Amino acid sequence: MAKRKEKAEIKTDGWKDTFSDLMNLLLCFFVLLYSMSTVDEVKYAELVASLSNSFSIFSGGAQAIGEGTLVSTGATQLNNLDEYISDMGKESKDVEDADDPLKEMREKQHQQMEELYGEMTEQAEIKHLEDDLDVTIDDGYQYVMLSLSGSVLFDSGSAEIRKEAQPILNRVGDILKNYQKNQIKIEGHTDNVPIKTSEYPSNLWLSTARATKVLEYFHDKKNLSLKHLEASGMGDVHPVASNKSAAGRAKNRRVEIKIYGLSEQLGK
């Protein structure tokens, strides 16, 4: 007797394979969308240029980042990329300079102070003041400073100008006469050794008196106008050396003459 043929089993879960493939495709699609949403412009340009060169796509050219044709034939894309990036850097610098309207004024100020420093240094040599005068320019290019030793100008605890120091102040005054339109500030400085006398109850009083005496000397002996002269005392708050040694304290006892630039010239 012939056997009955078994009925073939029909599979009904084949849709799962199709669904799984679809999910994978959707995942890849969304990953691609995300990566494109955060694309770096320069890297994107390099990628497009590379693809164009390798697969001859975008052969007709297209408009891209910025102005001008960036994506063109692959043969010329990489050659133009460096020039494009350089132009971007140049434009960025131009924008930065445009956002800093004070840059030109600062450059003029630097140039003016450097010229003033050169003139002061030259005049100090001509007047044979190299051993008595230190000429410096501040880091902010605000002024040129002439520093005189306090021990040369004054006796200890006194604000009276020594007779031996008058020739030095005369030569310094001759230099300053050429800059009477500049603001000139005279500052007195001391060491940190306390002083308390009937005339000067503190170092602040002594330093102020010394600066004032120098200012009066320039006005009386060299006819410098008081309009642009200013005197102040700083006491021992701005030492230039350690007060722990006699040599350091001697450096801290000083008179500084600060010659500022002409502000009206900076605006031109």
Image (spheres, rainbow, N blue to C red):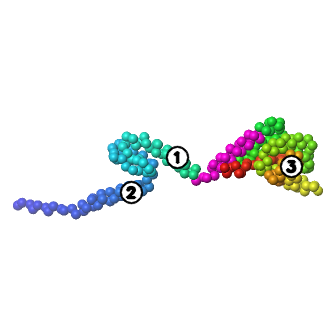
State the predominant SS element of the stretch in magenta. Answer: helix
In front of the other: label 3 or label 2? 3
Task: Please name the residue that numbered disc 2 is placed on.
Answer: 33
Q: Earlier in the sequence, mark 1 or mark 3?
A: 1
Furthest-right residue in this view? 198
Is 132 displayed left or right of 49 in the figure?
A: right
Q: Earlier in the sequence, mark 3 or mark 2?
A: 2
Where does the magenta region start and end? Answer: 99-121
Task: Please name the residue that numbered disc 1 is placed on.
Answer: 90
In the image, 197 versus 73, the foreground residue is 73
In front of the other: label 1 or label 3? 3
Calculate the distance from the C-alpha at mark 1 to the C-alpha at mark 2.
32 Å
Look at the image and tell me whether residue 228 can be seen: yes
**In the rendered structure, which amino acid carries the disc numbered 2?**
Leu
Calculate the distance from the C-alpha at mark 3 to the C-alpha at mark 2.
79 Å
Looking at the image, which residue is at 66% across and 49% down? 268
Q: Position of residue 215 (x, y in %)?
A: 85, 50
Is 226 displayed left or right of 71 in the figure?
A: right
Furthest-left residue in this view? 1
Looking at the image, which residue is at 73% across and 46% down? 138
